[in-house]
Amino acid sequence: MNSLGFDKAVEETRVVVAMSGGVDSSVTAALMAEQGYDVVGVTLQLYDHGKATQRKGACCAGQDIHDARRVADTLAIPHYVLDYESRFKEQVIEDFAASYLAGETPIPCVRCNQTVKFRDLMGTARDLGADALVTGHYVRRVGRSESAELHRARDAAKDQSYFLFATTAEQLDFLRFPLGDMEKSETRAHAERFRLPVADKPESQDICFVPDGNYAAIVEKLHPGAADAGDIVDAEGAVLGRHEGIIHYTVGQRRGLGIAAADPLYVLKLEPESRRVIVGPKAALENLRFRVDDINWLGTGDGPAESLAVTVKVRSTADPVAAKITGFADDTALVELDTPETGIAPGQACVFYDGDRVLGGGWIKREDA
């Protein structure tokens, strides 16, 4: 049994490594090559426009493709660049824009993993005769074959399980995550040990295709007129001010409202149909119950027959909190928190955990959806 769980010699085990041009995926490729696997590096060109391609720490465009190629040359492994730009635009960027138009707060990184990176790239890896698709994500795959489980990374600060909740059991069977048991400092040390040309490259912090963090500009470019003005109102409907488009706001937002008030005001809700932004005190953001849909279940069976005590994350930066999930009819469920959380935003993911194990998750729905 080799280190990836295959009952064959490492040199007879072909792995496709998804190489974004960053440190993590580069170290992943280097570790696989060092162990003697038959490694093929694949980089996806996902977008090729504007300032986003020139930012340090971007992903899958411009300089990053060049960096991935340099790493592959250093490791003496074959390397392919696949043009997935049209797929990425349709499945990720347009979905991102549509979510903002619907008054939601999207997570394009989840959609990207769910579509082009895992579903589409996995098909390409199989076409190349690979036994596994290997990535640099900080998450752990525990167990063998069809019984494999998805677990949080050992380095809690780097854990990416929230962004991978939509990974299916079939995909998990084909995926491997060598960095899941490492601290980030170990990864950097490996990069220096292998003398990789990206050893000092900074990490990506923002959404890869959004230059300067200007999300609204992307939405307006795809949907001219999306920034139609409307009213900012309180919970009773009293008009407090005007806005230049709901795409500039997210639930829980405090800054940029442009309203003078005795106490701080927060965005409580967005109404795309009436173009209203509803604001109120922070206490009004507290929520104990909400629904999720489009559930991906990675636990036992088809989901709990009755209510199940779990912990959940309602934002990527949040700590898991105690909750109960009930339902699963039509891929929807009711989530009931033990203690209220603020800023639970439609369009964000709610991920279910049993300890470190990822049980799955779903997308938070608008109350009136």
Image (spheres, helix red, strand yellow):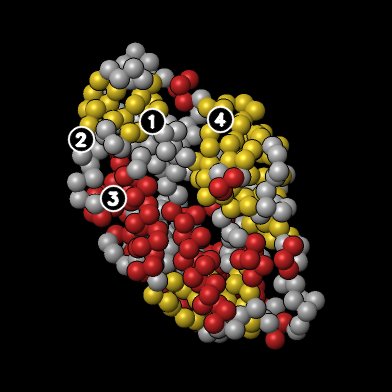
Q: To which residue does mark 4 refer?
A: 289
* Kind of residue indicated by mark 3: Val
The structure residue drawn at horizontal position 63% and vertical position 74%, both measured from the top left corner, is 132
Q: Mark 4 or mark 2, which is nearer the start of the sequence?
A: 2
Q: To which residue does mark 1 refer?
A: 269
Tell me residue 103's x, y (percent): 35, 40
Q: To which residue does mark 3 refer?
A: 219
Q: Which mark is residue 229?
A: 2
* Kind of residue indicated by mark 2: Ala
Q: Is residue 72 left or right of residue 224?
A: right
Categorize mark 3 by other alpha carbons within 10 Å: few (<14), some (14-19), many (20+).
many
Residue 298 vs 312, above or below: the answer is below
Q: What is the C-alpha distance between the residues marked 1 and 2? A: 16 Å
The structure residue drawn at horizontal position 23% and vertical position 45%, both measured from the top left corner, is 226
Q: Mark 3 or mark 2, which is nearer the start of the sequence?
A: 3
Helix, strand or loop for disc 4: strand
Quadrant of residue 307 within the rendered picture: top right
Q: Is residue 158 visible?
A: no
The structure residue drawn at horizontal position 74% and vertical position 62%, both measured from the top left corner, is 147
* Kind of residue indicated by mark 4: Arg
Q: Mark 1 or mark 3, which is nearer the start of the sequence?
A: 3
Quadrant of residue 318 within the rendered picture: top right
Front residue of 230 and 63? 230
Categorize mark 2 by other alpha carbons within 10 Å: few (<14), some (14-19), many (20+).
some
Q: Tell whether label 4 touches label 3 (CB within 8 Å).
A: no
